[in-house]
Image: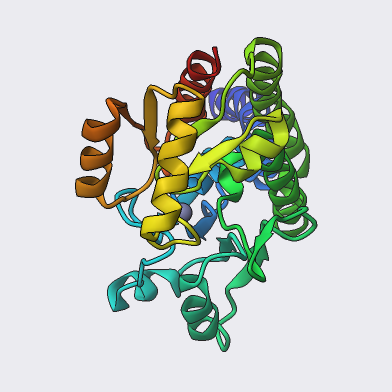
Amino acid sequence: MSLRFGLEKFMRYLKPGLLFLLTFFFLSQSSGLFAKPPVVAVSIPPQKEWVLSLMPDAKVVVVMPSHASPELFEPTFSSLKTLFQSDIYVFTGVLHFEEKIKNALKKTPVKKYDVSSGLSLLAHDGHADPHIWMSLDMAIKQVLGMARFFSEHYPDRQQDIQKRASAYVQKLQMLDKRIKRELVIKKPILVYHPVLSYAARDYGFVQLAVEQEGKQPSGKQLKGIINDIKTHQIRYILVIEQTNIDMVNQLAKEQRLSVLHLTVLSEHYLEKMTELADVLIKLSK
Ligand SMILES: [Zn+2]
């Protein structure tokens, strides 16, 4: 009797526990709690924040370091090797170095996603302007596109991804609205490397770039730029990507410009775009 009683008591305690364990097991399977974290490779640092905003547990491999120049960067063999272990490669679709990677991934099961698909790109001399991360409006479209792609690839995460996408996009929209509200456009904004073409289109300001089509300006072009600096009484030059710093310093000295350094090619995208927004608002006044 004592044995039977003990067994009954044991079963009575075991049943709810077992039920709990089974429920937990099935829930965790469907919510992906115990699923292997997704491994996503991205071309440039801002895309890392975008991936993590949708899937915070993802392991993200960034191909290009933030100090590199996206137009000149060449991926190393070791960075290619880490790509082969990824589930997905997210690329900009507008950077030269991505061709090499896409070729290397051809015979692998790695899925590829082009964030520029469906964007309205600006072109200079038949080449798409690559700075598609410099526009908040375009960043929102890129994040939403990634959310759709990830939802198809990880269907059990669909709801979670959509919820997170809305929350992150809302932050980008708030910053975009603030710029639209506070940017008072009075004069062109001077940059060394022309990274602001998309932002200029979004907010209706004029970008005055020293570099012409990725090259240093000719003597005649430089004369024209100096003329514009004088006409508009421009006092600042923005340096946003890897740049010929000697030339910037020389020009700044001659024209009495203050040099402002900024990086948006960062894994802290929203933070850096907020810094850029503050600078643009200040410079436009
Ligand atoms: Zn560039």
> Whole-percent x and y of residue 108?
55, 83
Image height check: is 131 above or below 17?
Answer: below
Residue extending farthest to the bottom is 107
Q: Residue at x 65, y 30 (%)?
A: 205
Where is residue 243? Give x, y as percent.
31, 50
Q: Is residue 101 left or right of residue 205?
A: left
- Residue 173 relative to residue 241: left or right: right
The one nearer the camera, 50 or 262, is 262
Look at 44% across and 61% down and name the residue there: 214
Closer to the camera in the image, 45 or 23? 45
Q: Position of residue 37 (x, y in %)?
A: 52, 51
Q: Classify residue 87 by image quadrant.
A: bottom right
Q: Quadrant of the N terminus?
A: top right
Q: Height in image: 247 above or below 113? A: above
Q: Quadrant of the C terminus?
A: top right
119 w.r.t. 270: above or below: below
Residue 209 visible within the image: yes
The residue lying at 42 percent from left, 59 percent from top is 70
How many numbered circles does the render carry? Answer: 0
x and y, in percent, of residue 278 in the image: 49, 17
* Residue 27 in view here: no
Q: Looking at the image, which is closer to me, 82 or 66? A: 66
Residue occupying the point 68% across, 31% down: 164
Which quadrant of the figure has residue 230? top left
Q: Nearer the viewer, residue 268 or 40?
A: 268
